[in-house]
Amino acid sequence: MTDLDVDDRFAIQQTTGRYAHAYDTGDVEGFVGVFTEDGIFEVVLVDQHDQRALFQGAAELRDFAESGMPRVNPVLHHVCGFVFDETDADEPRTRATVVVTKQYPDGPTVVTHGTYFDRWRKTEAGWRIAHRRYVALGYAGAHRTSPATP
């Protein structure tokens, strides 16, 4: 078992940043590209009776991104608290806190917050997410009524 070197750790953190920027800017192919070809994005909504969703493989990830990326009211993924839970170079695991905000006419609102639990795999293209499990501690949904709206 070999530990990750500093370059690999940096590359993994960069890929996490690319994930956020791709989603926030509506870059579907950039979003799909941070996952392995058979990558999994799993969502667990804790505050909604542990409701789950799972998207596996490039086609399902692409469908998710195309239907879920905002066309109006930009979103921003704020990712912090990034740590390596496992540093085995064959299958590192990381965890990070995320807060997603959405811009509305009356100001930004938190849409969701929780933790990413990621399993990584090194591919010819570099480090990619093999499995991202997002445990959402809260989710306001994609739609919100503005306080100015009766």
Image (cartoon, rainbow, N blue to C red):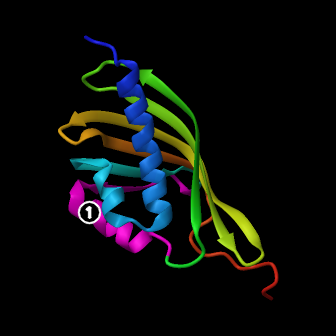
Looking at the rendering, the stretch of residues picked out in magenta corresponds to 48-70
Report whether 50 appears left or right of 32: right
The answer to which quarter of the image holds residue 6 is: top left
Horizontal and vertical percent position of residue 123: 20, 37
Question: Looking at the image, which residue is at 70% across and 64% down?
Answer: 109
What is the three-letter code of the residue carrying label 1? Answer: Glu
Residue 65 belongs to magenta span = yes
The vertical placement of 120 against 141, above or below, is above
Image quarter where the N terminus lies is top left
The vertical placement of 41 against 61, above or below, is above
Horizontal and vertical percent position of residue 42: 38, 50
Question: Looking at the image, which residue is at 58% across and 70% down?
Answer: 74
- The residue wearing badge 1 is 60
Question: Looking at the image, which residue is at 31% across and 18% down?
Answer: 88
Question: Looking at the image, which residue is at 45% across and 69% down?
Answer: 69
The vertical placement of 114 against 58, above or below, is above
Toward the front, the furthest residue is: 7
Number of marks present in the image shown? 1
